[in-house]
Amino acid sequence: MGTLPRRNDTIYKEIESFEDYELTQCVAYEMAVRNENVISLLNSLGVNKYENHDDYIYLLLNANDTESKELLKYGIDFVNHIQYLFETKSSLEMMLEDKIVFCPSNVVLQDILTEHELFTIAHHEMDADNELELDTDFYTYYNNFKKRLPKYRNHLETISSKDSLKIIENALKRKHTIPVETHFSRPKLELPLTPLIRIDINLELPEKELFAYIKAIKKRYSAYNDKNIPNTPLELLGVQLKKADNLVYKQEGKYHKAKETFSKQQKLADMFYIYDCLQHGDTQRKIQNAIYNYYADKGIETITMDGATLKKYKDIAIDYIDNMRYKELVTGVKL
């Protein structure tokens, strides 16, 4: 069965460190990779046999296409999963330091240029093309030009006319669109019915106003789809997890309910730890003591988690992992 999990293992500390904005996606991924069918498929693809970059390349080139497609039914994109597993430690750490990256060089030109501007640029380019046949039809040239127009602003070497470059420069000033790349701590699950909405946001506006705007869009979307999708994994995992929380801790002579002091991430880390230990055949008493000692070492006094609470955590994890209900976290669609 391998080495028994420990509550202070890196995997659980990483779960505790998930940012709020990435929590749902990362928790869903952690559930997916614990599903027995996913584990079986990854083992059959040889994922656990390799350790270095050359092995990673070998896996991608020799992966069984049928099994890779089968993984997608569980939301696992094989390429993304392998890339995450075999990233070198240094590059992975560097990626996680900058989870949100602004990419101004990736502005898509056709998104910011008007039809009139494209038309005018084509005129300038046609005039500057010395190799063009004299009887070339402009509209044919125009349609072909739009197809070969560089996609991004940092690939303008094919633009010949200074007048064309000036038009593009002015368009970039007029509409300063900045693409954003988000690198979550875990790969995103690729699931059908996942709603993705593009929103133009002016980050120069006050934070309170931006939050109100996103909240209004979220509310309108839920009403439009006749849904009331919970906002966080804990809400989606249900009131059950909150009801399961009967730990208390003492600090400065005061006792508080655990749900008031432990973060969502800590509770979820406890839940994954309990599930993993039981899967490895560890005893309930050892698990209870390990959780107690983990928080005690952090200066937090708790009462020992009782059997009913541990069972509740276990039942929630089994339901979402084994029955693939983790998909609901991402899509909002009940299975």
Image (cartoon, grey):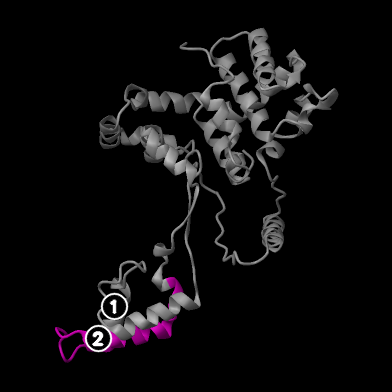
Residue at 68% x, 38% y: name it.
236
For the view shown, which residue lies furthest in the bottom direction?
135
The residue singled out by tag 1 in the image is: 145
In this view of the protein, which residue sits in the foreground, 151 or 42? 151
In this view of the protein, which residue sits in the foreground, 238 or 226? 238
Q: Is residue 284 left or right of residue 41?
A: right
In this view of the protein, which residue sits in the foreground, 14 or 197? 14
Q: Is residue 164 left or right of residue 8?
A: left
| Percent coordinates x, y for residue 300 in the rendering | 72, 22
In this view of the protein, which residue sits in the foreground, 1 or 193? 1
Q: Is residue 276 positioned above or below 173 on the image?
A: above
Q: Residue 266 lies in magenta, yes or no?
A: no
Q: How much space separates mark 2 and mark 1, taking CA atoms? A: 9 Å
The residue singled out by tag 2 in the image is: 126
Q: Which residues are magenta?
A: 111-139
Which one is earlier in the sequence, the residue at label 2 or at label 1?
A: 2
Could you tell me what secondary structure mostly forms the magenta stretch? helix
Tag 1's secondary structure?
helix
Which three-letter amino acid code belongs to the residue tagged 2? Met
How many marks the image carries: the answer is 2
Image quarter where the C terminus lies is top right
